[in-house]
Image (cartoon, rainbow, N blue to C red):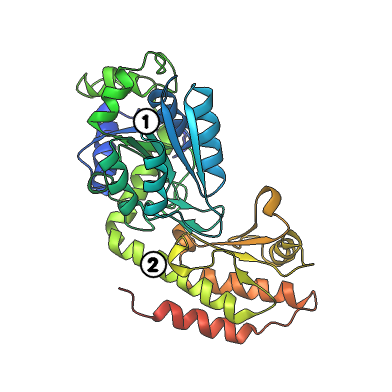
Amino acid sequence: MTHPLLDLPPLTAARFAAIERRVAALLSTEQDVVITQGEALLPLEGCIRSGARPGSTALNVITGPYGQTFGNWLRDCGARVVDLEVPFRTAVTAGQVAEALERHPETDFVSLVHAEAATGNTNPVAAIGEVVRAHGALFMLDAVASVGAEPLLPDAWGVDLCVIGAQKAMGGPAGVSAVSVSGRAWERFAANPAAPRRSYLSLLDWKERWIDGGRKALLHAPAQLEMLALEACVERLEAEGLEAVIARHASAAAAARAGALALGGGLEPYVHEAEDAAPVATTLRTPAGTDASEVVAAALAAEPSLPLAAGGGALAKEMIRVNHYGPDASPEAVASALAALGAALDGRGLPVDADAARRAAAAAWSRPRA
């Protein structure tokens, strides 16, 4: 008995290379693109372990939990790490990055997360890229949550290593990711004796055996279902149009923020300024004495498929996250999430206005955007 998801013909090298080219077009990049067979932490760690080395100095910008992870990896590689940490309720500025680089002129590696889905903020990469490029450091960007949700132009912004994943705004699976690699980055990797080789973390293996070999022989059997899903994600983005997808995510963010403010119940935006808020998730702070995880649990008990989550770790008791990415970047998903939150807060005796929230969200969704 055949099965459409199991009895598939082998994925050829030519098909793999064709998907790479479509991902490169999505990023508007002329750099090499490597599709990696795993969740985006795989290429992120591969980039750091290839680019950092003993004696180097790395500026690690922390605007959420992933920045903390990057710092740990950088230290593991023997690099001296300068952490630039800003409150998670805001974004880092290009000026802050410039000041840090001035204080540490020996810095040769900079790591940054574009959009932080976990905390709901996003960073001004274009301006930061200008600063890093002028300094001459290698620039690594985690764009997993931003690709497809907001403009992402690694070449124009001077990003040497741009890592993306399919599981957020692209609406795909978590098991496949990609990284664009500049010529400067390849040179840095090749000159690093500690860079992984003959390893699943090795980007140099892909460069030497796949790219330099003319993309004729894959390093290993590809993750077939995930590759086909990635191809389908790109096809869907192409069909809708990238600008339209980005506009849809911006509308979802504006609607969720406006609706939450109108809902009441003591909810406040966790990210203070709307311009710093990520288009993939709206994070909300619950009032003192109200456990965010309990509110989310009550909302999900009524409708388990809602795009709601409590904050991670220490934020679980005070943060609610409304995820509006991929298929959930829709008026219906935002409205349903707000209605469920309103019911959960009302059940705890907090004053809410569900009708006002619905009207505010609809108005914000319809408002023209620049």
Assess whether mark 1 and mark 2 are in contact (beta carbons under 8 angstroms).
no
Tell which tag, 2 or 1, sits nearer the viewer: 1
Please, what secondary structure does the residue beneath circle 2 have? helix
Q: Closest to the observer: 147 or 299?
A: 147
Residue 62 in percent (x, y) is at: 51, 45
Q: Which residue is mark 2?
A: 248
Q: Residues within 10 Å of mark 2 (few under 14, many from 20)?
A: many
In the figure, 218 relative to 166: above or below? above
The residue type indicated by label 2 comes to: Arg
Q: Is residue 67 above or below residue 171?
A: above
Question: Is 6 left, or right, of 163 in this rendering?
Answer: right
Q: Secondary structure at mark 1?
A: loop
Residue 155 in the image: state x and y as whole percent: 24, 44
The one nearer the camera, 209 or 195, is 195
Q: Residue at x 44, y 17 (%)?
A: 199
Q: Residue furthest front?
A: 103
Q: Is residue 1 visible?
A: no
Residue at point 65%, 85% (across, down): 353
Q: Amino acid at mark 1?
A: Glu
- Percent position of residue 137, x then y: 32, 35
Q: Position of residue 223 (x, y in %)?
A: 43, 30
For residue 134, which quarter of the picture?
top left
Residue under label 1, please give it: 106
- At horizontal 50% and vertical 35% (from top left) the residue drawn is 70
User: Which badge, 2 or 1, is on the more N-terminal residue?
Assistant: 1
**In screen coordinates, is 18 left or right of 74?**
left
Q: Nearer the viewer, residue 205 or 319?
A: 319
Q: Residue at x 35, y 33 (%)?
A: 35
Circle 1 residues within 10 Å: few <14, some 14–19, many ≥20 = some
Distance from the alpha carbon under mark 2 to that under mark 1: 42 Å
